[in-house]
Amino acid sequence: MIPGIAGIGINLLGNVAEQLGKGVSAAQAGASAGPSFGSLVSEAATRTIDRLENAEMVSMKALRGEADTREVVDAVMSAEQSLQAAIAIRDRIINAYLEVSRMAI
């Protein structure tokens, strides 16, 4: 497996989302019993990491001759889409945080 996969910013995304989720859930205590924003983003980050690891595993199988090209392409494309979505969400969260921090009190 890729040793630096946790360092691509997804952990940052999960940590920021957890902190935002704590603030939102504290503000909405009793308002709704649904999942928090932080838990939803953390789950998305976990799924992204799983897809990246799966793409790597399928690629290694293909190098050993145990998987065909179509499987590799499908796994890599799925991982790429998940990673792009995670990066876009991370960027939106950071931009929102920066905008809120610039607001006058």
Image: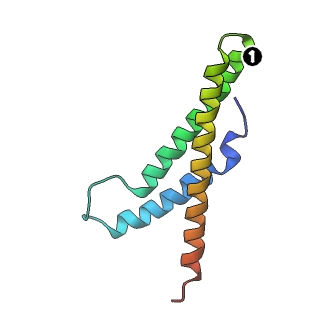
Residue 64's quadrant in the figure?
A: top right
Q: Residue at the location (62% across, 48% down)?
A: 84
**Residue 9 location in percent, x, y?**
66, 51
Q: What element does badge 1 sit on?
A: helix
**Residue 72 location in percent, x, y?**
65, 23
Q: Is 101 or 86 nearer to us in this picture?
A: 86
Residue 26 falls left or right of residue 47: left
Q: Spot the residue most to the front.
A: 70
Q: Is 10 or 74 nearer to us in this picture?
A: 74
Residue receiving disc 1: 63
Q: How many marks?
A: 1
Is residue 52 visible in the rendered structure shown here? Answer: no
Q: Spot the residue most to the right.
A: 63
Q: Residue at the location (61% across, 60% down)?
A: 91
Q: Spot the residue most to the bottom.
A: 105
Is residue 14 visible in the rendered structure shown here? Answer: yes
Residue 69 falls left or right of residue 19: right
Q: Residue at the location (54% across, 84% down)?
A: 103
Q: Amino acid at mark 1?
A: Leu
**Residue 44 location in percent, x, y?**
50, 45
| Label 1 Cα neighbours within 10 Å, binned few <14 / some 14-19 / many ≥20 | few
Pick the quarter of the image with the N terminus: top right
Residue 5's quadrant in the figure?
A: top right
| 83, above or below 27, in the image | above
Q: Is 67 or 32 nearer to us in this picture?
A: 67
